[in-house]
Structure formats: structure tokens, C-alpha cells
Amino acid sequence: MAYALEEGGGSAADGQPWTLDNVAVWRAKAPRTAFSLSRTQTWANGLAPSRIPAFTPSTIDKTVGAKMQPFQDWNLLIGTELIRSGGQSGLLSSKSMWESSWSQDLEEYGRLRVGFSTTGSLDNRQADYFQSFSGSLNVPLDLPLSAWNLELRLSPTMNVDVSHGSLSSNLISELVGQTVLSAQDAAFRSTLDLSVGYSFAPDTRPAASARLQLTISPKL
């Protein structure tokens, strides 16, 4: 149907008059893009209000940094850090860093839990590259101790430091247990954690370790 628009009204092709009150205008709006900072971490050290001018030498290093998780379904964090060293030089340097972790429960293999994590950094001032790899294997133990949850934990670690030309590795074997001391209807939950194990590294003697921790937290 063809319309002719004139001041004060118009008419349709069939001769029936119509006015501007019969016209409805709708403007399409572009969809708004939502931004979220829930996967972003920021930190600052050595920054505080002061009457000292900004360019006056200070003995305290000042650091500002941020990390972000670019992929929601992948536990990968990448970030950067700016460092202004204290003293007369006041050099400004930056550091890049990254970290990632993964874990999986293997029910078909007796409720095993496997984990892997890695962290790394690159310092442009010292030309230092550091990378760390670590893993974990948790094996549940079905022992006749109903009040305790026991498992055997194996944690291998390897560190690479390019600036010092070093490669180090380590293996920690632990017996880990946890028991709940509080009643189900108690206002606070108290748990007791116990770990006993050995640390093995090349060219060194095994080192024994033991840890006992009591945790009390309110039930919110």
C-alpha cells in the first residue's frame, strides 16, 4: 500500500484519510555488550598516601599488577606486573606471568584424583625465565577407620630457572587424613587434618615432615 505524507495528515491509495496520530515509530537499538571483571585480579604493594613528591627517591619498591582469566572454561591466568625499584636508581621494570591448573576425578579407577598445574614468569630487567611444573595423585585408602578419611598423595615437582641454568625436581609422598570433630547440629564445624610424609630429591637425603591442623569455622 502506498502512502503520501503531507503536513497535518495523509491519505491512503484507496482514498481513506489518516493523520499523524495513526503513525507509530520504533527505533531499533543495538544490543548492549555486557562486561564482567569477575575473572580479573589486581594488586598493589608499596603505594600509600604521602607528602613526599612522586619523583623523590624511596627505599620501598612499588608494584602494580593484574591478572585475568581470558577463557571461562579453562583455568588459565595471564598477567603483568610493573615494578619501580627503591633507592636512587628508581628503575622501572615489568614482569609477565601465567599459570594454569587442571584436575580430574577418575571414578572408574577407584576414585583416583589426578591434578596438574604450571606457573611461569618472564622478567625483562633481569632477563629471567622461570617455569614450574607440579602434579598430584590422590589415592583413597579403605582402612577400617570410620571416623577418618585417609588417602595417599604423591606430588612430583620440577622447576626450570634459565637465568641460573638450574633444573630441579622433587617428589613428596604423604599420608593425609581428615576427621570431623563437631556434631552435625553444632553451630561451628571443627575438622582435624593430619599429614605425614617424606620429600625426595636428587643428591639429597629424604626429608621427613608432619603437620597437624585444627580448623574451626562457623556454619553460615
Image: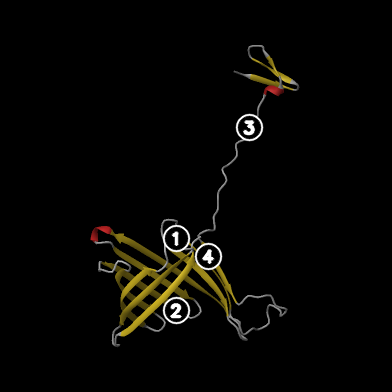
Q: Amino acid at mark 4?
A: Gln
Residue where numbered disc 3 is placed: 26
Q: Residue at x 51, y 79 (%)?
A: 125
Q: Secondary structure at mark 3?
A: loop
Residue where numbered disc 4 is placed: 41
Is 130 left or right of 55, judged from the image as shown? left
Residue 170 in sight in this render: no
Separation of residues labelled 1 and 4 (CA atoms): 37 Å
Pair 4/2: label in front: 4
Picture coordinates of residue 24 (x, y %)?
Answer: 65, 27
For this orientation, the residue located farthest to the right is 8
Q: Residue at x 36, y 75 (%)?
A: 194
Separation of residues labelled 4 and 2 (CA atoms): 23 Å
Q: Amino acid at mark 2?
A: Asp
Picture coordinates of residue 19 (x, y %)?
Answer: 71, 20
Picture coordinates of residue 175 (x, y %)?
Answer: 30, 75
Classify mark 4: residues with Cα within 10 Å, few (<14), some (14-19) or many (20+): few
Residue where numbered disc 2 is placed: 128
Q: Amino acid at mark 1?
A: Asp
Evaluate if marks 3 and 2 touch, with contact meaning CB atoms under 8 Å apart: no
Separation of residues labelled 3 and 2 (CA atoms): 60 Å
Separation of residues labelled 3 and 4 (CA atoms): 42 Å
Residue where numbered disc 1 is placed: 185
Evaluate if marks 4 and 2 touch, with contact meaning CB atoms under 8 Å apart: no
Q: Secondary structure at mark 4?
A: strand
